[in-house]
Image (cartoon, rainbow, N blue to C red):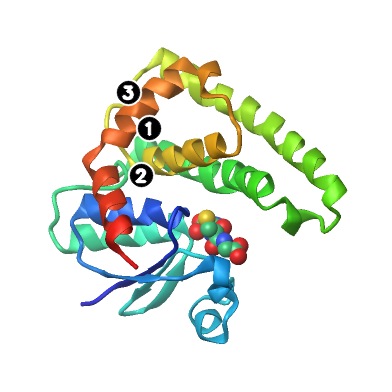
């Protein structure tokens, strides 16, 4: 059963690479060159009409969006008898991990988009500083939520075990810093991020992404 991940360097497709690494699932990596606009080419739009990465092409068809891919991969790992999981398997802790993933995808990621792609929000360059500063202010408020959590329980986002929500938040945290977020305001988050960066699944994803072209 073959799987192909369409990815782009430095993007949220890294979260799916961490998922695949964590579950020890085999796949082929196909790079989409965003700067060259390949995500808007007819060939790529035939795979993902949304024009975004990541997409995982499965034997049942292409699947886009980090959360949907995570749910699919966790089921696949169960079917293949793998030991690891991306999310707690059931009950409240599963729902809580999904809640953190939804926070990353639905609230934080669009703020990163506004910080880094303000020209897509408004063509007038005189508006870009305003768009970025509004996004940064909202992001800072949201980071306070994670800071409080990690101050109270300095483990992982969804509890005692690493979950894919940690990988998604780490990607956002790193992107936010590239956009100027001052990490020193959030010491508990900073400590968590140092551990999350060292997590074997993240390290492997970084290594695979660096080698893939
Ligand atoms: N909700 C989507 C977000 C996907 C997304 O925004 N991908 C960005 C990279 S992080 C992208 O492909 N950008 C290319 C573009 O907008 O042209 C997901 O969960 O995968």
The C terminus is located in which quarter? bottom left
Q: CA distance from mark 3 to mark 2?
A: 14 Å
Q: Position of residue 13 (x, y in %)?
A: 42, 57
Q: Position of residue 44 (x, y in %)?
A: 51, 80
Is ligand 1 closer than 8 angstroms to the Cβ of mark 2? Answer: no
User: Dot 2, crowdedness within 10 Å: few (<14), some or many (≥20)?
Assistant: many
Which one is nearer the viewer's eye here, 202 or 37? 37
Q: CA distance from mark 3 to mark 1?
A: 8 Å
Residue at 56% across, 72% down: 36
With 62 as the anchor, is 110 left or right in this view?
Answer: right
Mark drawn on residue 164 = 2
Confirm or deny contact between disc 2 and disc 1 (CB under 8 A): no
Is ligand 1 closer than 8 angstroms to the Cβ of mark 3? Answer: no
Residue at 67% across, 53% down: 117
**For marks 3 and 2 on the same chain, the one whose residue lies earlier in the sequence:** 3
With 56 as the anchor, is 25 left or right in this view?
Answer: left
State whether residue 50 is above or below residue 101. below
Helix, strand or loop at label 1? It is loop
Q: Position of residue 133 (x, y in %)?
A: 75, 34
Is ligand 1 closer than 8 angstroms to the Cβ of mark 1? Answer: no
Q: Which residue is mark 3?
A: 155
Q: Which residue is mark 1?
A: 158
Name the quadrant containing residue 123.
Answer: bottom right
Viewer can see residue 74:
no
Residue at 12% across, 58% down: 81
Confirm or deny contact between disc 3 and disc 1 (CB under 8 A): no
The mark lying in front, picked from 3 and 1, is 3
The mark lying in front, picked from 2 and 1, is 2
Q: CA distance from mark 2 to mark 1?
A: 9 Å
Helix, strand or loop at label 2? It is helix
Which one is nearer the viewer's eye here, 156 or 191? 191
């Amino acid at each position: 059963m073959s799987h192909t991940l369409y990815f782009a360097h430095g993007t949220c497709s890294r979260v799916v690479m961490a998922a695949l690494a964590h579950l020890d699932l085999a796949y082929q990596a196909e790079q989409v060159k965003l700067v060259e606009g390949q995500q808007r080419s007819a060939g790529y739009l035939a795979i993902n009409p949304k024009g975004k990465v990541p997409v995982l092409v499965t034997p049942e068809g292409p699947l886009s969006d980090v959360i949907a891919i995570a749910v699919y991969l966790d089921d696949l790992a169960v079917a293949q008898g793998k030991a690891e999981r991306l999310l707690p398997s059931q009950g409240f802790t599963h729902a809580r991990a999904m809640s953190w993933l939804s926070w990353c995808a639905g609230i934080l990621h669009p703020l990163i988009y506004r910080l880094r792609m303000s020209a897509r929000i408004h063509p007038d360059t005189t508006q870009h500083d305003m768009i970025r500063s509004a996004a940064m202010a909202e992001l800072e408020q949201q980071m306070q939520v994670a800071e409080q959590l990690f101050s109270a329980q300095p483990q992982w986002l969804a509890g005692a075990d690493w979950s894919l929500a940690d990988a998604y938040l780490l990607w956002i945290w790193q992107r936010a810093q590239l956009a100027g977020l001052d990490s020193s305001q959030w010491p508990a988050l900073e400590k968590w991020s140092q551990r999350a960066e060292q997590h074997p699944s993240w390290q492997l994803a970084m290594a695979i992404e660096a080698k893939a072209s």
